[in-house]
Image (spheres, coloured by chain):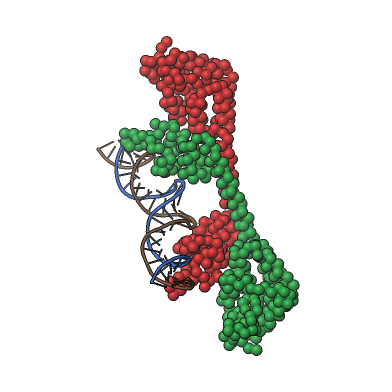
Chain colours: A green, B red, C blue, D brown
DNA sequence: CTTGACCCTGACGCAACGTCAACCCTCCAC
DNA sequence: GTGGAGGGTTGACGTTGCGTCAGGGTCAAG
């Protein structure tokens, strides 16, 4: 009675979709007319409309198959499950919207608000964008790696910034990209860092070094950023401090075993 | 520094995904070590986390490419557009949920509430499920074809059911599947239909036949449902009425030209 | 020396069709 | 009768974002 295009039109789908449903056995192949054309009846229209209704709702065709060939009780169960999946998917998309919104507003990508605020505070101190980019990238990694640690560590950072020594340190770090490698101010940087660490150790905040490959990765990033960074770390190592992201004391007898100790003065 | 699996772990993606991003040029291929292994640095981690964040939000990878390689203003614009798309998608899924909910509750599939109610009224009259299935399928097609006509036509059907003649008609139709082809009650059915049509014509409700292939399709379905249906329509044709879904008067001189007129009595 | 846990490339698979290509039918106008 | 428009047919490749082998090589440890 019906050609494939009229069948498709009645059900509101494309001809290609109908043929696809034939291929996967979702809609039975109908009789052919004398010239090989498929010839459909109304039952096909009804089945196709049902298929379309479910498929449009995002139900996978394999599941459509099951549902249509099942009894009413299995059908109801299947529909309930699909509803649950839809709810979950909607929630997922809404989460994504929130995240995307933060992307647009915040520090480019993938950063919690606390970090964005912290970086803004650095900007407020006049810190150079190149240094901020370094910090940002490090925080991106930290946020991906240990998201629930971030706010805690950021809070500590904020407290650090209440110390004028640290403000001075950031001033120096901010300029560091424009220095020559042998600029004497690297020593001031090392001094500031060391003073701060000594006070931290005295205060019992011995951040005894998370000592894991992730910290090594962060350190490596920092070292690669500039030869001056390497000098700073080298000076600190000579003085018995190891690392950067998570600095820790090194037993005195091992100092020197870890660094070539050749390019620093003092 | 990093092997591919550690890189992937840091960013929360699979190794296969990383290689895929290389293939499509989304993440640059890094250096290889002496044995041909890819060797990543922290910058790769950062880029990969960014990619992952966007991709997880449902952004197509091609678009991720554009966004990451664009300036902040283009980035913001792109993000805004993605947000619009997400909103649209969420709305779509919510529509689907509503439809799915009606599927579960209502008359199996793809029917508006008015039709479901109407079919329930038929059930209340004791109409056989086989007949109801026929009606349901017809309504599925009508609802897909002319959704805004449905409620109007259903309202008319409800008014019809206030007529005891129609109630009697449905009683008969309900049993029809168990009759032998030559059951005399088919004549009673024809009488009832004819009386109703005459009154309809007198009342000026000459539903002068939507006369289109869609109506033909509905009629064909009805005719195929049972040989008795064919007899009923044949009797009506002898008396000058044509069709079923949308019955109309046929000029007297053409009666008989349309039917073989051989199997009816009276 | 073997074993297990990595790494590599290449290639097919999936879901739900879209989109040619190359060819057949039918009808209608010229 | 012939050509063109507008149907239909099968076959096969393209899309998106990877999953999942297959068939190798590499590396550290027991």
The picture quadrant where one finds residue D6 is top left
Give whichever of A23, B177 is nearer the camera: B177
Identify the residue at image location x=54%, y=39%. A77
Q: In which quarter of the image is the C terminus of chain A?
A: bottom right
Identify the residue at image location x=53%, y=41%. A78
Left or right: residue D6 compared with residue B91: left
Q: In which quarter of the image is the N terminus of chain A?
A: top left
Q: Is A8 rendered above or below residue C14?
A: above
User: Whole-percent x and y of residue B71?
Assistant: 57, 65
Q: Is A222 rendered above or below residue B155?
A: below
User: Whole-percent x and y of residue A93?
Assistant: 59, 52
User: Whole-percent x and y of residue A152?
Assistant: 69, 65
The picture quadrant where one finds residue A252 is bottom right
Identify the residue at image location x=55%, y=67%. B45
The picture quadrant where one finds residue A263 is bottom right
Identify the residue at image location x=49%, y=30%. B137
């Amino acid at each position: 009675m019906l050609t494939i295009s009229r069948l498709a039109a009645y059900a509101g789908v494309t001809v290609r979709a109908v043929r696809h449903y034939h291929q996967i056995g979702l809609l039975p192949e109908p009789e052919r007319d004398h010239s090989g054309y498929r010839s459909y009846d109304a039952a096909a229209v009804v089945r196709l409309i049902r298929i379309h209704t479910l498929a449009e709702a995002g139900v996978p065709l394999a599941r459509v198959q099951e549902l249509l060939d099942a009894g009413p009780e299995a059908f109801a169960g299947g529909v309930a499950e699909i509803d649950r999946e839809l709810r979950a998917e909607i929630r997922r998309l809404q989460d994504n919207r929130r995240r995307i919104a933060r992307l647009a507003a915040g520090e480019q990508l993938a950063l919690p608000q606390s970090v964005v605020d912290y970086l803004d505070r650095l900007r407020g101190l006049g810190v150079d964008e190149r240094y901020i980019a370094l910090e940002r990238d490090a925080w991106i990694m930290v946020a991906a790696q240990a998201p629930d640690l971030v706010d805690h560590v950021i809070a500590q950072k904020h407290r650090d910034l209440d110390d004028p020594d640290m403000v001075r340190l950031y001033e120096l770090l901010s300029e560091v990209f424009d220095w020559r490698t042998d600029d004497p101010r690297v020593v001031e940087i090392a001094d500031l860092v060391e003073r701060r660490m000594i006070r931290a150790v005295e205060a019992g905040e011995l951040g005894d070094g998370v000592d894991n490959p992730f910290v090594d990765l962060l350190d490596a990033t920092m070292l690669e950023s500039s030869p001056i960074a390497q000098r700073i770390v080298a000076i600190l190592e000579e003085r018995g401090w190891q690392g950067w992201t998570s600095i820790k004391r090194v037993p005195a007898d091992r100092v020197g075993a870890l660094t070539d100790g050749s390019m620093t003065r003092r």
